[in-house]
Image (cartoon, rainbow, N blue to C red):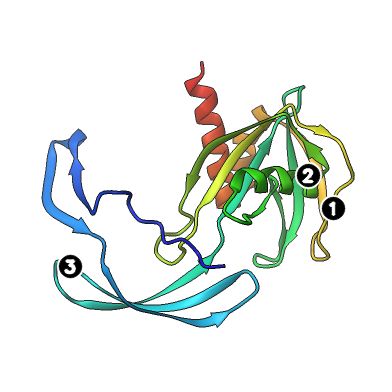
Amino acid sequence: MQGRVVGPGPASSCCICLARHGILLSVMIEEWELLESKVDRDYRVFRIQSELAMSPRTKKVGKFYTIDTRDWVNVIPVTPEGRIVMIKQYRHGSKEVTLEIPGGLVDENDPREAAQRELLEETGYAGDRVELLGFVNPNPAIFNNRCHTYLVENAREVSEKALDPDEDIEVVLMSADEIPSIIAGGGINHSLVIVAFHFYFMKKLCSQ
């Protein structure tokens, strides 16, 4: 699937303004012109692309390598009792068992549906309210996708897990109050999971 190149928005340029410090930079940073793009390697879940792009300001051409992949989704499921449905699983990249939240790849550009599907498949849980908390660009230097975080409330166990052959997942229920200290102690070290909890706790803080 062709990934989406995420730009700064509808505006063609971005004026860098550090208003809180009383500094206004007059240089207009614009999107570079894409001159060439080709696929170097095509794998199951991502493609490596080599691209040439030109700076509109300096007219210099740079060569870039990008990882073209689908969007990702993370889910924070909260039970009626206020417990968060966490998962433990082996991650081959870091060669360790990690404490995370359910998540996965987005199909057909529908992150909301993917959030509900991944939650059900990885935990057997489902909820009656799904809310988008926010999204991030995981690494805009080389990735062209987004990671969306959803909150699922009133999550209850409704079925057995439906895991892929390369998945082995343990479901763990935790109190939200435990999460900050676990993150601080390194017990949760997946960067996108930490970002998801940032969205979650910011929502709680703003609703007070």
Mark 2, residue position? 120
Looking at the rendered structure, the secondary structure element under dot 3 is loop
Disc 1 versus disc 3: distance between alpha carbons?
Answer: 50 Å
Mark 3, residue position? 56
Looking at the rendered structure, the secondary structure element under dot 1 is loop
Residue 120 image position (x, y, % from top left): 78, 44
Question: Mark 1 touching mark 3, by CB under 8 A?
Answer: no
**Mark linked to residue 162:** 1
The answer to whether residue 17 shows anywhere in this view is yes
Inspect the image, locate mark 1, and give the three-letter code of the amino acid beneath it: Ala
* Residue at the limit of the structure toward the left, as seen here: 26
Question: Mark 2 touching mark 1, by CB under 8 A?
Answer: yes
* Residue at the limit of the structure toward the bottom, as seen here: 40
Specify whether 69 is left or right of 49: right
Specify whether 73 is left or right of 11: right
Disc 2 versus disc 1: distance between alpha carbons?
Answer: 8 Å
Residue found 86% across the figure and 36% down from its top: 158
Specify whether 109 is left or right of 127: left
